[in-house]
Amino acid sequence: MKLKKIDDLKTPLLTVWDKCEYNNVYFKNNINLLTQKGNVIQTFDTATNDMLIHTIKNYENIDVLLLINKSPTESLRYFDEHLKDNYTKLAIKNDEYNKNMLLKILYQLYYERNSITGYRHFTDFIFRKFNYLKDKTDEELIHFTLFIVIKRNSKYNQISIEEDDHYLYAPMNNNEKDILSTIFLNKNSIDLMKMQNLEFFFIHGIDEFKHKFNIYRNFVNEQLNREDQSQMLLFSSIILNIIGHRKANDIDFLAFNLSEESKNNLLDFRERHINDFRNDTEELELSESQENNEDNTESFTINSTNGNKRSTKKDPNRCMDIFIKNTEHWPHYWSVWLDDWSRKSGAKYFKEVLANGDYHCYFLGMKLTTLKMDIERRLSRERPRAYADIYALKRRYNLKDFGIIDLDLVINDKKEKCFQLKDISEEEKNRILLEKGGRIRENISEIYYYEEQNISKFVQTML
């Protein structure tokens, strides 16, 4: 699809809003005024950024280029001398970041071009490629100019240009266009990178991360249409993995409002990659410590029907926890819980988290919750592991930026109590259901409930 008139700039974003059942009158007025003026865009708010992200994603004659280490004036001169014969300017965005941020940006931009195996390998590669950057101090700012342009010839493809004192990065495919645009056109993506310790990110198993993340990313890019891609959201420990805090053993994501075709594709994907070893003749028996581990990091102990136990190691390709709306793989309480979680994070409701760039961010072009949202979820979970993560984050980062000031909280461990239905009276069963919020596992004729134990002093001692 090609952009034919400026007024069509807003169409892809409004289509995503419709898909999310979301509307923002203030944002809509802003982008209406912007498209009516028809000027080169040089001021950016969330509505403008979101509009441009989806414009770049949907129109094949829209391109995005990044010029590094040229001042704003030099960048305009560069465009006139080298690019204007092939492009018309649509938007120009100028930013400045230090060398540390540059490395994090270039890691994403070069993700598909190089097999980087370690932090030193990566930094050596970058500084060999861009020798003039090596001697810059961490305090020196490097200028970035993002050009969003309309191709004069739709068949023309700009190549990256490396010079002695500057670099023009040109995406080689749509995936790289998505990565570049979602870095510079989403403030939360920049904030996430500011929190990221790139060296720790590599230390926490970069090859394992890439294996898992690529399974997810390839599915989204290859099996979902552009509208349905907007309905996918990564959450949980993958955010902590990205910032270099700790490894995520699984990738958690949800799919909100998919077309039937995309939903069927995802259900097939789930069968191949879900982190689940259950079948008709075997029952998973998780230890208490494993139930409190949201990533299921340990091996599973399986009870076979013949009573024998055996240890089963996790298949590296079964590394996903997947939640699909309008299927059986969607918790019944999420219709309420997702909105509650979103409100605690500043959004009006969950649909706004999906549709409004103020409430999500991106990594390698994939949409994920912000760190603030992740912290709010951990606070709500009230589990020792969740609180331990928050305390560790507090030690490493300034969490005041996320509205988290006092973390001296009461921590309750939820210990499961369960009974076979045949072993208790009807009166006791009703008491557990009514007074303790119990639930029944019909398939194994078992009733269970959670008993809270205050372990605040223990956890704080460990921290």
Image (tube, rainbow, N blue to C red):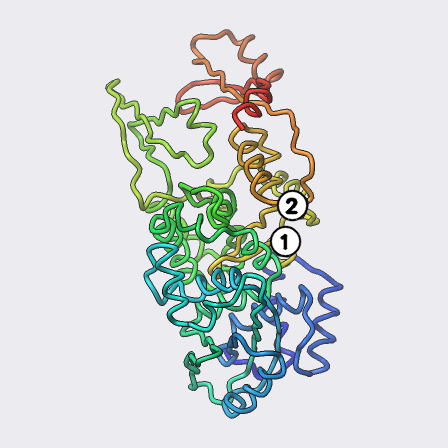
For disc 2, the marked residue is 342
At 38% across and 49% down in the image, what residue appears?
Answer: 209
**Mark 1 closeness class: few <14, some 14–19, many ≥20 residues within 10 Å:** many
The amino acid pointed to by label 2 is Ser
Q: From the viewer's perspective, is residue 121 above or below residue 85?
A: above
User: How many numbered badges does the structure rendering display?
Assistant: 2
Q: Is residue 203 above or below residue 310?
A: below
Q: CA distance from mark 1 to mark 2?
A: 9 Å
Taking depth in this image into account, of 165 and 114 the one nearest to the observer is: 165
Q: Position of residue 198 (x, y in %)?
A: 46, 53
Name the spot of residue 139 as percent of width and height, x first. Answer: 58, 62
Q: Along the horizontal axis of the image, is 213 left or right of 330? A: left
Could you classify mark 2 by the number of other residues whose Cα lies within 10 Å: few (under 14), some (14-19), or many (20 or more)?
Answer: many
Q: Nearer the viewer, residue 273 or 257?
A: 273
* Rendering coords of residue 103 (x, y %): 47, 62
> Percent position (x, y) of residue 371?
58, 47
Left/right placement of residue 19 relative to residue 108 reads: right
For the C terminus, give its image quadrant.
top right
Relative height, residue 315 to residue 19 (above, below): above
- The kind of secondary structure element at disc 2 is helix
Residue 39 falls in which quadrant of the image?
Answer: bottom right
Task: Determine which residue is flagged by label 1.
Answer: 359
For label 1, the SS is: helix
Determine if residue 268 is in view.
Answer: no
**Which residue is drawn at the image coordinates 31% and 26% (left, top)?**
301
Q: Is residue 267 left or right of residue 235?
A: left
Give the residue type that dot 1 points to: Tyr
